[in-house]
Image (cartoon, helix red, strand yellow):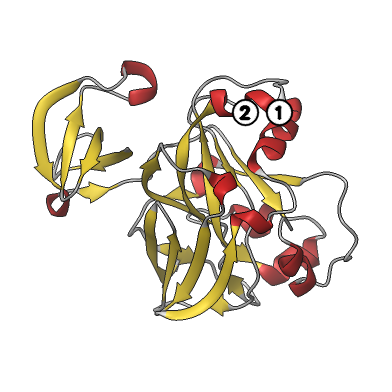
Amino acid sequence: MRIARFASVDAEPRYGIVDEGEIVVLRGHPLVAGYETTGERVALDDVRLLAPVIPSKVVCVGMNYADHRADMQFSNDSPERPLLFLKPSTAVVGHGDPIRIPPVDGRITHEGELAVVIGRVAKQIRKEDWRDYVFGYTIANDVSARDQMFADGQWARAKGYDTFCPIGPWIETELDPLAGVEIQTYVDDEPRRHGNTKNMLFDVPTILEFAADVWTLLPGDVIITGTPSGLGGFVAGQRVRIDIEGIGELSNPALARD
């Protein structure tokens, strides 16, 4: 089942179930009100898809594919634990929203990633219970000001700019990330990154257990699980598209901020 957050012209955001080319409108947020419908259906082409959640925090996993570690010239030794960092909720935008590129030196890069949406409060959970805490899955782009990462010696500024975390287009509740899910990233339809979740160094259950030992994960929080191999930047005027098998497509144009 696919859950979308959407807006019609001059209307407040609403939630609905995507049913082919239509949205079956729900009475409220599905994490609060469940799946009771209003009886209304709207055409998908007649609404604007919004970021499917506005999380209290975005938990990010760095260097979670061996080939990406090699791209970044990190040690080839297997890490002992996931590398975690945070993005602010103000970085989140939805499908079709522009990525606003700030006037900074160096490359702005794309990182297409599988995103996990938390469905209930998770704190110090057991790995084997991980499915109990997952609402569903969506697509994320961990946009980064690459040169700032190395200049600062940490990643908060380089990855935390407004619009640097597109998420969408909706939440897929029935995906199995352990089965092996293909991830593709394109810039103006040119292939840039490719990978499969079966090649993660740390799988979703391990990440969820580790993250929930650090922070209390709240309903609607998002964990993005790392990007596969493929380096390359993008500039204003280009479009970044991320396709994830079983979910769909997240596409965002890049525009200059100023």
Q: Quadrant of residue 19?
A: top left
Q: Residue furthest front?
A: 179
Identified at 56% across, 70% down, the residue is 194
What residue would you read off at disc 2? Answer: 130
Amino acid type, mark 2: Trp
Query: What quarter of the picture does the N terminus occupy?
Result: top left
Q: Nearer the viewer, residue 188 or 177?
A: 177
Q: Position of residue 139 (x, y in %)?
A: 46, 52
Q: Quadrant of residue 154?
A: bottom right
> Along the horizontal axis of the image, is 209 left or right of 45?
right
Q: Quadrant of residue 112?
A: bottom right
Q: How many marks?
A: 2
Amino acid type, mark 1: Lys
Q: Is residue 43 above or below residue 1?
A: below
Identified at 22% across, 19% down, the residue is 36
Q: Position of residue 203 (x, y in %)?
A: 68, 45
Cβ atoms at labels 1 and 2 below 8 Å apart = yes
Badge 2, how many Cα within 10 Å: few under 14, some, many 20+? some
Identified at 74% across, 44% down, the residue is 84
What residue would you read off at disc 1? Answer: 127
Q: Nearer the viewer, residue 213 or 125?
A: 125
Q: Is residue 176 above or below residue 67?
A: above
Q: CA distance from mark 1 to mark 2?
A: 5 Å
> Along the horizontal axis of the image, is 129 left or right of 71?
left
